[in-house]
Image: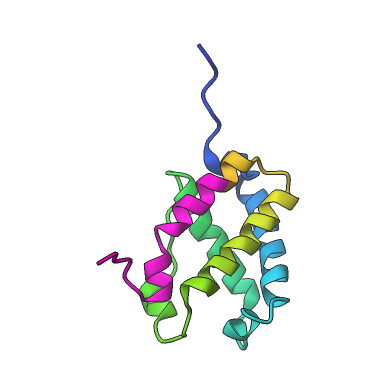
Amino acid sequence: MSEPEADLLDQLGGTDGLRRVVDEMYFRVLADPELTHFFEGVPIEKLARMQTEFIASITSGDIEYTGADLTRVHAGRGITRAHFSAFCGHLADALEASKVSSNAIHQVLGKLAMYSDKVTGSANVDG
């Protein structure tokens, strides 16, 4: 029998490794002229802590997200699917720069995609 695959959070380097990835992601996001305005006046240190906790919670069954409701926090901010996609792209680049496997990156992005409606405020309806 083959050895079981490591917990997804472990594949990201645990919470410490994930925090470094999130810090790198926000460095990229804040340099992106399409995204930076969403973060004006936002305490990035606190946001990075909450983002780390959120991603940890969706990649491990042992961690609970204690932050604000995603729909409420993002409501009325004008975040589109293109913005969400760009944000996820920066996360993917930060994960890749941290030598996370492409399989683990795809798993994380798949889990995040389930929250796009909460962030963008739009329903995913195909008619």
Q: Give 55 or 87, whichever is nearer the viewer.
A: 87
Question: In this rendering, does residue 69 appear at all?
Answer: no
> In this picture, is 48 found above or below 60?
below
> In this picture, is 122 found above or below 11?
below
Q: Residue at the spot x=72%, y=70% of the render?
A: 27
Residue bounds of the magenta highlight: 106-127
Q: Is residue 2 magenta?
A: no
Q: Residue at the spot x=46%, y=85% of the render?
A: 77
- Count how many numbered circles sit on residues in the image: 0
Q: Give 114 or 4, whichever is nearer the viewer.
A: 114
**The quadrant where residue 37 appears:** bottom right
Q: Is residue 116 magenta?
A: yes
Left/right of residue 14 with respect to residue 27 in the rendered view: left
Please provide percent x and percent y for residue 30. Answer: 69, 76
Please provide percent x and percent y for residue 8. Answer: 53, 41
**The quadrant where residue 25 appears:** bottom right
Please provide percent x and percent y for residue 100. Answer: 67, 43
Left/right of residue 9 with respect to residue 23 in the rendered view: left
- The quadrant of the picture occupied by the C terminus is bottom left
Q: Give 126 or 32, whichever is nearer the viewer.
A: 126
Left/right of residue 119 with respect to residue 101 in the rendered view: left
Please provide percent x and percent y for residue 62. Answer: 44, 44
Colour option used: rainbow
Q: Residue furthest front?
A: 127
Q: Residue at the spot x=29%, y=64% of the render?
A: 126
Q: Residue furthest left?
A: 127
Question: In this rendering, does residue 41 appear at all?
Answer: yes
Left/right of residue 79 with respect to residue 95 in the rendered view: left
Q: Residue furthest top?
A: 1
